[in-house]
Image (cartoon, rainbow, N blue to C red):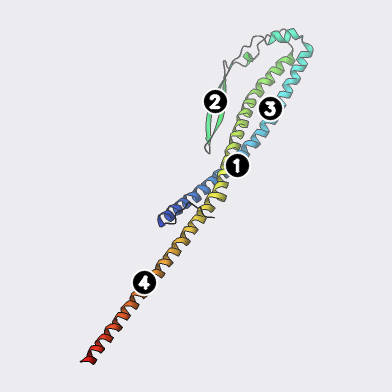
């Protein structure tokens, strides 16, 4: 149904036709964006699944190591071992633009590059199980950071996909059909007005011809009457 506030003029018809062309181009671009976002999203989802499996496996192994260390060491010895950490980690956040979505990129740096600095205790009074658990946990840390980055990226991509999908549906099912209906309505109104104008012109022409014809007939009658009088 055409909008009740629309004015059926040629200027309005031209404006709506330009708007329809723009809406169709925007619809195509948004559909392409949605498809590419879906492709990138599926890639990230698969990567996220693999990372989560690796992280869960690494954390499970580290927990088993801590459990074994706890069984062979006293609670006080474990607390003392982790009382004063030697290593320090700093986290940096950058952003990567994927189809207008700023996804985070996490990077970290340790205070020193010495692998032994991750052990905050001496090896004389701790068990080898504790060393293995700490080593396994340090190995899984980069994967945990990568998993956090991927999960956040998936959340942002999913939100953008939903927003793009709404825009595509609004253009496809609301705006473009409404514009087409309005254009059709204006075209029909303009055609109707043009036919009405032609009919009026034809009637005026017929009236003028009729008046001119009657006038010539009366002039001929007067001329014949004058001739008869003479």
Look at the numbered discs 4 and 1 and tell me whether their residues touch, using CB distance below 8 Å. no
Q: SS class of the residue under badge 4?
A: helix
Q: Would residue 123 be visible to someone looking at this image?
A: no
Q: Position of residue 139 (x, y in %)?
A: 66, 22
In contact (CB < 8 Å): disc 3 and disc 1? no
Dot 4 corresponds to which residue?
Answer: 204
Judge depth for marks 2 and 3 and give the one in front: 2
Disc 3 to disc 4, how far (Cα)?
90 Å
Answer with mark 3 or mark 1, whichever residue precedes in sequence.
1
Element assignment for label 2: strand
Q: Could you say whether the residue bearing mark 1 is in a helix, strand or loop?
A: helix
Q: Which residue is mark 2?
A: 93
Residue furthest to the left: 230
- The reply to whether discs 2 and 4 touch (Cβ–Cβ < 8 Å) is no
Judge depth for marks 2 and 4 and give the one in front. Answer: 4
What x and y, as percent, mark residue 224? 26, 89
* Comes first in the chain, label 2 or label 3: 3
Residue receiving disc 1: 38
Q: Nearer the viewer, mark 4 or mark 1?
A: 4
Q: Quadrant of the C terminus?
A: bottom left
- Pointers 3 and 4 in contact (C-beta within 8 Å): no
What residue is pinned by disc 3?
Answer: 55
């Amino acid at each position: 149904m055409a909008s009740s506030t629309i004015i059926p003029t040629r200027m309005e018809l031209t404006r709506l036709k330009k708007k329809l062309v723009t809406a169709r181009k925007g619809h195509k671009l948004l559909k392409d964006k949605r498809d590419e976002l879906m492709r990138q999203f599926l890639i990230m989802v698969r990567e996220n699944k693999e990372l989560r499996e690796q992280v869960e496996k690494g954390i499970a192994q580290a927990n088993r190591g801590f459990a074994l260390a706890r069984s062979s060491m006293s609670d006080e010895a474990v607390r003392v071992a982790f009382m004063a950490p030697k290593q320090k980690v700093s986290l940096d956040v950058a952003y990567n633009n994927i189809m207008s979505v700023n996804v985070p990129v996490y990077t970290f740096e340790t205070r020193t590059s010495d692998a032994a600095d991750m052990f905050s205790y001496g090896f004389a009074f701790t068990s080898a199980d504790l060393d293995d658990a700490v080593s396994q946990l340090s190995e899984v840390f980069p994967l945990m950071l990568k998993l956090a980055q991927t999960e956040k990226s998936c959340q942002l991509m999913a939100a953008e996909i939903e927003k793009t999908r709404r825009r595509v549906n609004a253009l496809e099912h609301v705006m473009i059909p409404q514009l087409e209906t309005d254009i059709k309505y204006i075209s029909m109104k303009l055609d109707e007005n043009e036919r009405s104008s032609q009919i009026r012109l034809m009637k005026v022409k017929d009236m003028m011809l009729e008046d001119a014809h009657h006038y010539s007939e009366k002039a001929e009658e007067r001329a014949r009457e004058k001739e008869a009088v003479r």
